[in-house]
Amino acid sequence: MRLRHVTGSEHILNQSDYIIHDYQNDKNQFSKLFQNENKKLYIEIGTGKGNFIIENAKRNPHINFIGIEKYDSVLVRAIQKIGDENITNLKFIRMDATNIDEIFHHEVDLIYLNFSDPWPKARHQKRRLSSSFYLEKYETIFKQEKHIIMKTDNRKLFEFSLKSFVDYEYKIKNITLDLYQDEIEDNIPTEYEKKFHDLGYPIYFVDVEKK
């Protein structure tokens, strides 16, 4: 996918109160940044243009949300989408997920993996966000129970992820090979999800937990 440069994106992000700028020093105390009484923290890795996490935060004001995105040109679209709204339980971090275990420490309740890069070549499977390489990192960022919800249009990535989750002792709570046919309750679509669904592709969904 070619990412279009957005003029002034760096300035927009630097000026936004929704961006956590000094995240390296906020480890284990992100809850203080929200200035609310919420006990739960959900993160989305690869938040894109923000449709999913913004709507999720609006629907669930009792939960804090942080979106992780490494591309300025994409993240700025999320900030622009928020506009003048005041969503007090939502923040974003500009970073590569490779370092996620250096940022969070036993403070995350749920991870969303929505339409992650499938990295189709076998030699790149370590880069998949559902690989054992990342699952090991997630172990240190979850509070206690580990909870991951994943959506994708890529069948091979989905199959790889299921095996990866099970091998890492996750239990499948809910699964569907066609999200819109099975009508998962309270589904919030991402931008990619809308696109692929409109093209007639099935959307794969899995919800896994580990004690």
Image (spheres, helix red, strand yellow):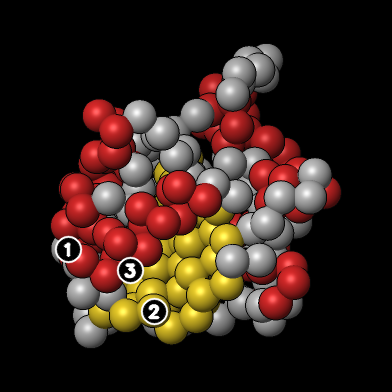
Kindly check if marks 1 and 3 are in contact, taking CB atoms under 8 A apart as contact.
no
| Up/down of 15 relative to 110, above or below | above
Q: Residues within 10 Å of mark 1 (few under 14, many from 20)?
A: some
Q: Is 204 drawn above or below residue 81 in the view shown?
A: below
Circle 3 residue? 108
- For the residues carrying marks 1 and 2, which lies nearer the camera in this image? 2
Mark 2 element type: strand
- Examine the rendering and report whether any part of residue 183 can be seen: yes
Q: Nearer the viewer, residue 186 or 75?
A: 186
Q: Residues within 10 Å of mark 2 (few under 14, many from 20)?
A: some
Q: Position of residue 76 (x, y in %)?
A: 62, 33
Give the mark nearer the N terminus: 1 vs 2.
1
Q: Secondary structure at mark 3?
A: loop
Q: Earlier in the sequence, mark 3 or mark 2?
A: 3
How far apart marks 1 and 3 lie (CA) works out to: 9 Å
> What residue do we see at 66% from left, 66% from top?
178
Q: Quadrant of the C terminus?
A: bottom left
Q: Which residue lies under the disc numbered 2?
A: 172
**Dots 1, 2 in contact, CB < 8 A:** no
Circle nearer the viewer, 3 or 2: 2
| 110 sits to left or right of 86 | left
Question: Type of residue at label 2?
Answer: Ile
Quarter of the image with the N terminus is top right
For the point 62% across and 77% down, which residue is it? 60
Q: Amino acid at mark 3?
A: Val
Q: Which mark is residue 197?
A: none
Count every numbered label the image shows and give the total: 3
Which residue is labeled 1 in the image? Answer: 140
